[in-house]
Image (spheres, grey):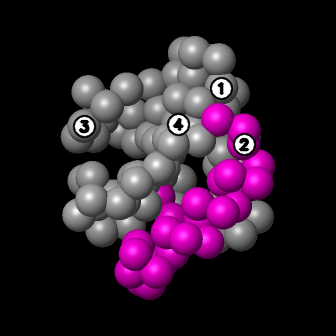
């Protein structure tokens, strides 16, 4: 499910280093990479939140988490540093197979 996105017209390549640093300082289990698109995966127990550009030119916030606690913590942290557009209802989006 796509919960929202970072609302910025700045290229995601330019946002990526700062965003990754923020996420790594806040969460202990993080994987990331850039290969055409950029992605950051945050893990906590069985939960996973993805910040990626797989289906957008902006970083989208995605999760298939059962309880939604991790995605809410990620959104709260990002909201302190970035303008976010949060969907009223999470949307189905591409690449759910990454979860």
Please identify, in this view, whether the residue under mark 4 or under mark 1 is nearer the observer. 1
Q: Upstream in the sequence, badge 4 or badge 1?
A: 1
Query: Residue 65: where, in percent of width, then height?
Result: 52, 22
Spatial CA span between label 3 and label 2 = 23 Å
Image quadrant where one finds the C terminus: top left
Which element carries disc 4, helix, strand or loop?
Answer: strand
Query: Please, is residue 31 above or below residue 14 in the view?
Result: above
Label 2 neighbour load within 10 Å: few <14, some 14-19, many 20+: few
Query: Residue 38: where, in percent of width, then height?
Result: 36, 59
Query: Please, is residue 3 above or below residue 25 in the view?
Result: above
Front in this rendered view, residue 52 or 93: 52
Q: What residue is pinned by disc 2?
A: 27
In magenta stretch: residue 66: no
Are dots 4 and 2 in contact, CB under 8 Å?
no
Which residues make up the magenta segment? 5-29
Q: Upstream in the sequence, badge 4 or badge 3?
A: 4
| Residue 35 shows up from this direction | yes
Label 1 neighbour load within 10 Å: few <14, some 14-19, many 20+: few
Are dots 4 and 3 in contact, CB under 8 Å?
no
Q: What residue is pinned by disc 3?
A: 95
Are dots 1 and 3 in contact, CB under 8 Å?
no
Which element carries disc 1, helix, strand or loop?
Answer: strand
Spatial CA span between label 4 and label 2 = 11 Å
Query: Residue 21: where, in percent of width, then height?
Result: 66, 63
Q: What residue is pinned by disc 4?
A: 49
Q: Upstream in the sequence, badge 4 or badge 2?
A: 2
Are dots 2 and 1 in contact, CB under 8 Å?
yes
Mark drawn on residue 44: 1
């Amino acid at each position: 499910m796509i919960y929202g996105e970072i609302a910025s017209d700045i290229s995601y390549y330019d946002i990526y280093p700062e965003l990754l640093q923020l996420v790594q300082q806040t969460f202990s289990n993080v994987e990331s990479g850039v290969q055409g698109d950029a992605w950051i995966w945050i893990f906590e127990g069985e939960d996973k939140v993805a910040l990626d550009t797989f289906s957008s030119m902006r970083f989208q916030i995605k999760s298939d988490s059962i309880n939604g606690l991790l995605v809410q913590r990620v959104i709260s942290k990002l909201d302190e540093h970035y303008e976010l557009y949060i969907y009223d209802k999470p949307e189905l989006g591409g690449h759910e197979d990454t979860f």
